[in-house]
Image: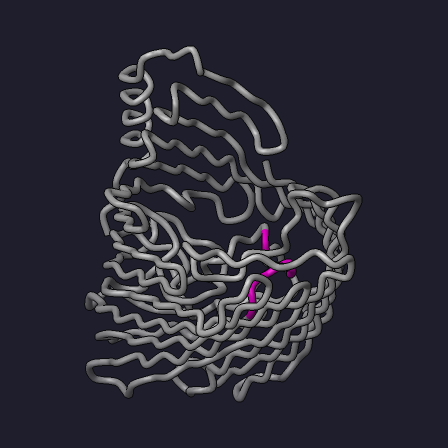
């Protein structure tokens, strides 16, 4: 896949937008919890420089590695630009762990609720992928995220209403790959649709479906890796590398329910990998999780994203406390993948200090079963300091 210099292109667009926009009396520069923000004119141009920092201290024992350490999990400056409420751009670079581009895209909103996006961003497929790491109540995503697409380079059209969202696009491999994601995933179509059959002010029931199909070149391969407890240490499960791949198809089913200060969600993903000469392969996984705002704050729902988006903290009085639990699994038991399965239980306690700062404690117990090697288990404890600005 060809790599484009999208950073330089976006920089040029930013410069043109800045010089082309005249100065107004309403120009304003603010520095606060959400970073540096520059507003020029009456919604003519808005520039915000923020980011996220996640620093982890942890213990980790998987039977092979037994360590106590600390490191940055994420360190991402985040530049966002909006022109006349029609054009928006975003550039996000990761300095910690698997370095490289994350979000790098431009988006048009020609009419209300209709968006056209191009660049490097999260592929529309499943709920967990589109939820920001700053909002989920766990240190890492579930085991099934190993087989979901994550980021991709491509284009997408989306439309959202009061009770539904529909997003679909065509994607190639991402510019850069997060740890645990296959750097090669072919190219093809992906779509996600969500619906709210129950939509009361404080209670919502969410249903979502996702579909993905990818075609592979003759030289491309596929290998999945799953992390548990912390992504800073080596992958907990790694499949054998698949070759002779023609295509893959994935389906996703998701369900979520929020009511006041309680939230529940789950997903199931099944994937078929089609090969030309060798036998076809299947892999699947899922998770179920629940969370509770002990201090009573209610959970929010993003209508534009079609997902649960964390607790409402804007007017919090003092600290807010959250408790969450999750069970996840990954079934890569096909002999061609190495005959491996894994399950994990995560328990988290989160102290929200402000709407943009929190401390998280996550304990993880995971089990790895391998038909070809000795089974083992993992125990991990993690403390994270997280700042969003």
Residue 62 in view in this figure: no
Q: Quadrant of the C terminus?
A: top right
Magenta stretch bounds: 135-142
Residue 63 sits above or below residue 323 on the image: below
Asked if residue 363 is among those painted magenta in the image, a careful observer would answer: no
* Total numbered labels: 0
The residue depicted at 63 percent of the width and 77 percent of the height is 327
Q: Nearer the viewer, residue 82 or 136?
A: 82
Q: Nearer the viewer, residue 34 or 326?
A: 34
Horizontal placement of 311 versus 159: left or right? right
| Residue 42, horizontal then vertical, whole percent | 39, 23
Horizontal placement of 366 versus 338: left or right? right
Q: Is the magenta region chiefly helix, strand or loop?
A: loop
Residue 119 sits above or below residue 171 on the image: above
The residue depicted at 51 percent of the width and 82 percent of the height is 340
Residue 362 sits above or below residue 315 on the image: below
The residue depicted at 20 percent of the width and 81 percent of the height is 276
Horizontal placement of 61 versus 302: left or right? right
> In which image quadrant can residue 245 be found?
bottom left
| Residue 296, horizontal then vertical, whole percent | 74, 59
> In which image quadrant can residue 15 be found?
top left
């Amino acid at each position: 896949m060809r790599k484009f210099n999208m950073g330089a292109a976006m920089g040029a667009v930013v410069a043109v937008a800045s010089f082309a926009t005249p100065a107004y009396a309403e120009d304003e520069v603010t520095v606060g919890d959400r970073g540096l923000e520059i507003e020029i004119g009456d919604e003519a141009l808005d520039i915000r420089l923020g980011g996220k920092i996640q620093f982890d201290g942890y213990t980790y024992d998987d039977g092979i590695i037994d360590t106590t350490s600390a490191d940055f999990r994420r360190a991402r400056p985040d530049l966002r630009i909006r022109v006349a409420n029609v054009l928006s751009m975003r550039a996000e670079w990761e300095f910690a762990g698997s370095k490289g581009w994350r979000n790098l895209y431009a988006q048009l909103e020609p009419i209300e609720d209709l968006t056209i996006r191009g660049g490097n961003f999260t592929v529309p497929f499943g709920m967990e992928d589109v939820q920001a790491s700053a909002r989920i109540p766990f240190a890492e995503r579930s085991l099934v995220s190993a087989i979901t697409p994550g980021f991709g380079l491509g284009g997408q059209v989306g439309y959202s209403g009061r009770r539904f969202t529909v997003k679909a696009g065509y994607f190639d491999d991402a510019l850069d790959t997060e740890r645990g994601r296959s750097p090669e995933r072919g190219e093809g179509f992906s779509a996600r649709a969500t619906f709210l059959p129950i939509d009361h002010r404080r209670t919502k029931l969410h249903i979502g479906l996702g579909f993905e199909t990818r075609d592979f070149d003759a030289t491309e391969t596929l290998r999945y890796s799953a992390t548990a407890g912390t992504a800073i240490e080596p992958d907990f499960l790694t499949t054998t590398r698949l070759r002779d791949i023609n295509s893959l198809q994935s389906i996703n089913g998701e369900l979520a329910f929020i009511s006041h200060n309680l939230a529940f969600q789950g997903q199931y993903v099944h994937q078929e990998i089609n090969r030309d000469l060798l036998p076809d392969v299947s892999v699947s996984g899922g998770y179920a999780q629940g969370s509770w705002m002990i201090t009573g704050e209610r959970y929010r729902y993003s209508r534009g994203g079609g997902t649960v988006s964390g607790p409402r903290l804007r007017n919090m009085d003092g600290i807010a406390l959250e408790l969450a639990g999750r069970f996840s699994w990954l079934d890569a038991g096909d002999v061609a993948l190495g005959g491996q399965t894994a399950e994990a239980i995560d328990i988290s306690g989160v102290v929200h200090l402000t709407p943009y700062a929190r401390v998280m404690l996550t304990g993880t117990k995971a089990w790895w079963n391998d038909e070809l090697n000795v089974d083992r288990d993992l125990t991990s404890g993690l403390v994270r300091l997280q700042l969003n600005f």
